[in-house]
Image (cartoon, rainbow, N blue to C red):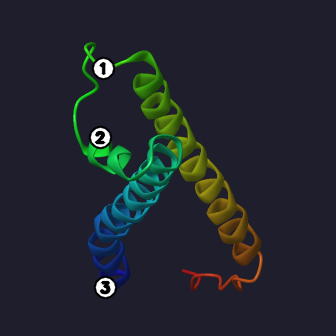
Amino acid sequence: MGAASGTQTLLRPVGGSLGVAVLGSVCTGRLTATVTDRLGADGARLSGGELSPELPEPVRHAVRTGVVEGLHGVALGTAALCAVAFALSWLVREVPLRGR
């Protein structure tokens, strides 16, 4: 029992960190792709900075659209991952603990 709970305690934050890193890279990749598609090659420079009010409206709209597209990709990826995890959970064999 102790080894299993220790392993769970170790792997839970590792999985959370890995998940945040992967989904963050998906969001950033989609943001950069959307802004580059809308503004050309110079648009990739805007995806890492602050959205300044001095930017022209088409540029601000492109960045906002990129953020929405990035979050949309993260939401779809998370939903697909949850569906796969749910389906795989039905394959786990139940092993009762020993009686008293």
Q: Which corner quadrant holds the N terminus? A: bottom left
Q: Is residue 48 above or below residue 33?
A: above
Give the x, y percent position of residue 2. Answer: 30, 80
Q: Residue at x 51, y 47 (%)?
A: 34
Earlier residue among tags 2 and 3 = 3
- Is disc 3 surrounded by few (<14), some (14 to 19) or many (20+) residues within 10 Å? few
**Above or below for 79 versus 6:** above
Find residue 53 and report its horizontal and vertical position in percent.
28, 13
Q: Is residue 51 left or right of residue 31?
A: left
Residue for point 35% across, 66% down: 12
- In the image, what residue type sits under mark 2? Leu
User: Where, by quadrant of the figure, is residue 69 drawn?
Assistant: top right
Q: Amino acid at mark 1?
A: Leu
Residue 56 or 78: which is nearer the viewer? 56
Q: Which residue is mark 2?
A: 46
**Looking at the image, do the residues carrying marks 2 and 1 touch, with CB atoms under 8 Å apart?**
yes
Residue under numbered circle 1: 55
Q: Secondary structure at mark 3?
A: helix
Residue 75, disc = none
Find residue 74 and report its horizontal and vertical position in percent: 54, 51
Q: Tell me which label, 2 or 1, sits earlier in the chain.
A: 2
Between disc 1 and disc 3, whose residue precedes? 3
Q: Is residue 66 left or right of residue 97?
A: left
Q: CA distance from mark 2 to mark 1?
A: 10 Å
Please indicate whether residue 9 sits to the left or right of residue 72 in the image.
left
Q: Nearer the viewer, mark 2 or mark 3?
A: 2
Disc 3 marks which residue? 3
Task: Name the secondary structure under disc 2.
Answer: helix
Q: Identify which amino acid the numbered label 3 is placed on.
A: Ala
Label 2, label 3: how many angstroms apart (C-alpha)?
A: 48 Å
Q: Distance between the Cα atoms at labels 1 and 3? A: 56 Å
